[in-house]
Image (cartoon, helix red, strand yellow):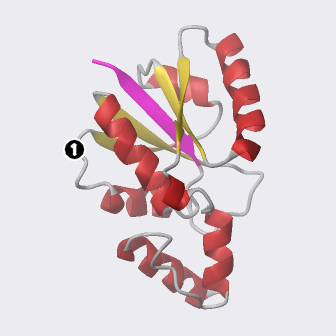
Amino acid sequence: MVTAVYPGSFDPATYGHLDVIRRASVSFDQVIVGVLHNSAKSPLFSVEERVNILEKATKSMPNVIVKPFDGLSVNFARQNHAKVIVRGLRAVTDFEYELQMAQTNRVLAPDIDTVFLTTSLEYAYLSSTIMKEVAKFNGDLSKFAPPEIIEAVMLKMYEK
């Protein structure tokens, strides 16, 4: 059984993230979505909220598990007996950073490979930052994420 981890902040998750999760779930026996607690950032949602939102959004994918984590992705992969780290690429601009991270991870954990999945073209422009910016000005989010994520984003924006 091949387990892969897909680490990220997912603040909030978008159709692009869900596209990568869905495609990874077809390629690997088990996909563990790792929701990163990054103390250097000020996220819109808490780690627990992001985990809950992603669990709802991936409920139709039986081999997908969502877990919180902090620290290095390779350590999270090892803790979950994963042999693969999945990373999504939207555009060429993502590649340089992601390649550097993959090479660093390879030095830290030579037994864990990184697999890049290019986001489907229809989501190549999309990021959590863009989604939050559109939400801030009450724009239409229907092309960015499924209803359960949009609802959570709008409720959180309303709170602020």
Taking the image as shown, residue 1 lies to the left or right of residue 117, namely left
Residue at (66% x, 70% y) in the render: 130
Q: How many marks?
A: 1
* Boundaries of the magenta span: 1-8
Q: Measuring 52% from the left and 48% from the top, which residue is drawn there? A: 119
Crowding at dot 1, Cα within 10 Å, few <14 / some 14-19 / many 20+, comes out as few
**Rendered position, 137 above or below 59:** below
Residue 43 lies, in percent from the top left, at: 66, 63
Which residue carries the number 1 mark?
Answer: 62
Query: Is 95 included in the stretch rendered in magenta?
Result: no
Quarter of the image where the N terminus is located = top left
Residue nearest the viewer, comparing 37 with 16: 16
**Quadrant of the drawing holding the C terminus:** bottom right
Identified at 68% across, 66% down, the residue is 129
Task: Give the residue type at disc 1.
Answer: Pro
The stretch drawn in magenta includes residue 2: yes
The location of residue 134, given as percent across then percent down, is 64, 81
